[in-house]
Structure formats: structure tokens, C-alpha cells
Image (spheres, grey):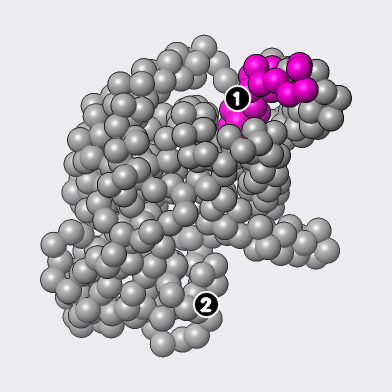
Amino acid sequence: MKRTVFTAEHEAFRGTVRAFLEKEVEPHHERWEREGVVDRSAWLAAGRQGLLGLAVPEEYGGGGAGDFRHSAVLTEEFARAGASGLAIGLHNDIIGPYLTALSTEEQKRRWLPGFCSGEIITAIAMTEPGAGSDLQGIRTTATDAGDHWVLNGSKTFISNGILADLVIVVARTTPEGGAKGLSLLVVERGMEGFERGRNLDKIGQKAQDTAELFFHDVRVPKENLLGEENGAFLHLMTHLAQERMSIAVAAIAGAEELLEITKRYVKEREAFGRPLAKLQHIRFEIAEMATECAVTRAFLDRCIEEHTAGQLDAVHASMAKWWATELQKRVTDRCLQLHGGYGYMTEYRVAKAFTDGRIQTIYGGTTEIMKEIIGRSVLG
């Protein structure tokens, strides 16, 4: 079916993104995979091309486009290219809303121009060694010391952890238990006591730097409090829908691209004297995946429209994230199977997709957390 969610303007932007990927990302991605981190120059190139800060007001150097569909186009093209290293989606769609919605005027002028130019790379630090999706288990503390906070604790699995110049840290600012008493503090590169651990060795997304972060008596100025003191839980819940939508958009785009690759493969690859595509079992497998992708695409496009209009709720965002990422996992596994032994070879796109995509059902809230959110809503 012809997609109707995008306008001519969005499709023109898609062309810009594809040109950027061809010139600035694809020639270098294999090296970034080996090195475990992308070049900072790629972030600067993205800034020059206008791919950073799409929703940031123009007065701070952004694109001024509050239309989520531009972000969806960007996410789709990166997913189809298999370009997992340059975490622009994290920067734009997850961290950007916190900075634009919660920053004071002084903070916006201090951080947003660099955010949009690529000179300031960002990260958000929620996950801790003992607390994954459970915000109530956060142990990182920030003690009020008058004109500053004293931050102590550690975080793990932090995307952009090595490159980040600005890290939004979720910390406990009151001893009160549970999700209450959490605040968002912005830690900047060079602050004394802020240390980065190892660049974590993951099974996939090798080019995307993911690190441990440590905070030892870091003096964070009161001017670096983001949003309301003890208001982090509400802030985080407000912006999770977009994070989950971004992951879902990448998931369906990745599944669709891998299906196209596999369709070409089974038409070319022969077994028993004829192309694989002539075997009924292969045709049934392709038919099932094509149908599942088409149904999922229809739902995701509707969610994109709803989110663009500011009407998408957390429950439907959770549905999108759960369904699309689990579909991506199934499609990737089946496509690898259809490639046979070649699917297990890293030189084939399906092998990389198998390891890169496995995280999709985990980060941004696991499938199990998504089901819990949906279940609570359905059952009341």
C-alpha cells in the first residue's frame, strides 16, 4: 500500500539523509565497527547538514521543525542503511526533548547551539548496575551543598558514553524511597570526579560507543539542574513515548529492509537445480513476513500521525515498541535461516542485522515492561 503519512517535503528530506549516509557514514562504518566508536567529525558533518536538533527552535541553531515525521524519516533511513554507530536518534529524539522542554533560557543558550552543530554530543544516564528498567532502584545520589550538588554513583550501558560532552544524569536528591526524590542533573565533560569506564564490548552495534560512567564527588552547579528538583520521574514518563516510537520506527524499517534483501537472495540462490524462490516453503515464509510487516507498518504509520499531532499515549507507544521490535527479531531470525550458512557469515547484511537488532526488545523498556504497561491499562 502507498504510504500517506509523509509529504513531498518529508520525501525531499529523505533524499538529504540518504546523500549524507552515502558520503559521511557508509564509507567509514566498517572502520567504526572495528574501533568501537564513530569519528567526531561525523557529528559535525551531521550538524552542517541540518540533521541535528530538528525540533530545536531556529534561534538556537535548530531546524525549528516540531514535526516528528522528519525524525521518523531520519530513523528509517539509518535503519535501512544498517548504520547503528552514529546515534543521532538518541541525540535528537530522546535527549533533545528534555533540553528543549525543561531547560531555562540560560541553559538553552549555553547548550542548544552546540547540540545542533554537533560540537556537543549528548547522552542520558539512567541505567545502573543494580537497576535496569526500575527507576525506583536508582542509587546514584546528589547531595545539596549550597550552590552546587555533590554527585556520587555509577551508571552502565550508556549510549554515547565515550563521546558525550553533556550527560543528563538521573540521581536521587532526597533520601525518600521509590521513584520520588529523583532529579535530572547535567554533567559536562571535564567536571572533576566524572570518569568514563571501558567502552563495553557488545554483541552488536559495535560502532556505537556504550560505556560505564562513574561520579566521585562531582560538583554539579545548581545551574545544571534540568527541570524541577525531585521532578525527574514525571519528566522521564512524559518523554518516554517518543523514545519508544523512535525504537519502533527503526524496528519496522529494519525488518522491511532485511525482507527486501532476503527476497533478492532467494531469487538468485539455487538449490536442487532451481532458485529458492520456486520452493513453496520459501514462498510461504516470505508471504508470512511480508504480511506481518505490512500490518505492522500500517499501525506504526498511524502512531506516527498520532504522535505528530501530540495525541499518542504511552499505552499505544508501548504497543508499537513491543510489537515492532519483536517482529524485527522474528523476521531477522527467519531471514538468516533462509540465507543458510551464508547468513551466519558476518560479510552478509543479515548476520550484522541479527546481532545489531537484538537489543531492540531490551533498551527503551523491555518487552516485558511494555506488556506490563499495556496490561495495566487494559485491565484498569
**In the figure, is residue 261 to the left or right of 228?**
right
Q: Main secondary structure of the magenta part?
A: helix
Residue 321 place in picture, x, y as percent: 63, 48
Quickly name the residue at label 1.
261
Q: Is residue 356 above or below residue 299?
A: below
Q: Is residue 352 left or right of residue 18?
A: right
Question: For residue 147, what is the image quadrant?
Answer: bottom left
Residue 351, given in percent of the width and then of the height, sits at 54, 40
Q: Quadrant for residue 272, please give it.
A: top right
The answer to whether residue 230 is visible is: no
Residue at point 25%, 74% (across, down) = 215
The residues colored magenta run 252-274
Q: What is the x, y in percent for residue 28?
A: 29, 32
Disc 1 to disc 2, C-alpha distance: 43 Å
Find residue 359 and name its label: none
The answer to whether residue 301 is magenta is no
* Viewer can see residue 334: yes
